[in-house]
Image: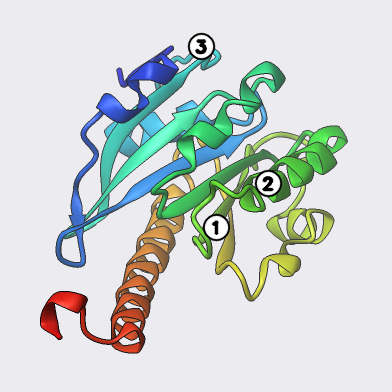
Amino acid sequence: MGHVMGKLSDILSVDCRFPMNGDRESRILMLGLDAAGKTTILYRVKFNEAVTTIPTIGFNVETVTPVPNVTLCVWDVGGQQKVRALWQHYFCETHGLIFVVDSADKARLWEARDELLRALTNPYMTPGIPVLVLANKQDLPGSMTASEISDIMDLKRLSPNHPWYVQPTQGNTGVGLHDAFKVLARMVKQFHKDLSKAELINRHESGPDATEV
């Protein structure tokens, strides 16, 4: 079941070169505090069933196809505090970020906010990647709405640097996940288009290569 307790040395050994928009690979990173429900979500999307999970010490990686012709390679990385220092080793070549929040854990929501901002401002993180925030565990008593989570985490400050979207979800039942991943697929496709456009502009502004002169 994925690469449970995967080692850091294994990160670059997993083949995630799945095309989107031509020969682009789509590598998605899924982060969040411990016990937010990341692994449950990953395998609910992958197998469409509830899977018993244990705390992720390393990482899990699976490919999912949320919409036809769009395949995402999703890296689910452990969220324990001692593991978060290793998050930056997964940032390179990331095309989208899923950040999972426990909607019923209001006491740690500010901690989640700080970790999200820290990840997005890390110099190793791909600039401008789209962000999908999953307001998970909506079925629990006292869970906050997606709007409340958006306000507390001050997600509006991500604009205009990062396109973002908040989706209420129930990882154990799958409620909201299909819609969430459809939105993510759309945002990632747009991200690839923007990258291609930027590359064309850069080549045009740089002029011909020395070999062409």
| Disc 1 residue type (three-letter) | Val
- Horizontal placement of 110 versus 18: left or right? right
Judge whether residue 172 can be spotted in this image: no
Q: Earlier in the sequence, mark 1 or mark 2?
A: 2
Residue that mark 1 sits on: 131
Q: Could you give the CA–CA distance between mark 1 and mark 3, rounded to whole angstroms?
A: 25 Å
- Between disc 3 and disc 2, whose residue precedes? 3
Q: In this view, does 75 lie to the left or right of 196?
A: right
Could you tell me which residue is drawn at 73 percent across and 69 percent down?
156
| Render colour scheme | rainbow
Front: mark 1 or 3: 1
Q: Where is residue 60 in the image (x, y as percent from the top left)?
A: 39, 24
The image quadrant where one finds the N terminus is: top left
Circle 1 Cα neighbour tier, 10 Å, few/some/many (<14 / 14–19 / ≥20)? many
Secondary structure state at the residue bearing disc 2: helix
The answer for how far apart the CA atoms under marks 3 and 2 are is: 23 Å
How many residues crowd around disc 2 within 10 Å: few (fewer than 14), some, or many (20 or more)? many
- Residue at the image position 57 percent from the left and 63 percent from the top: 165
Task: Indicate the secondary structure of the residue bearing disc 3.
Answer: loop
- Which of label 3 and label 2 is nearer to you? 2
Q: Mark 2 points at which residue?
A: 116
**Residue in front for this viewpoint, 55 or 115:** 115
The disc label shown at residue 54, or none: 3
Q: Distance between the residues labelled 1 and 2?
A: 10 Å
Quarter of the rendering containing residue 45: top left
Mark 3: which amino acid?
Ile
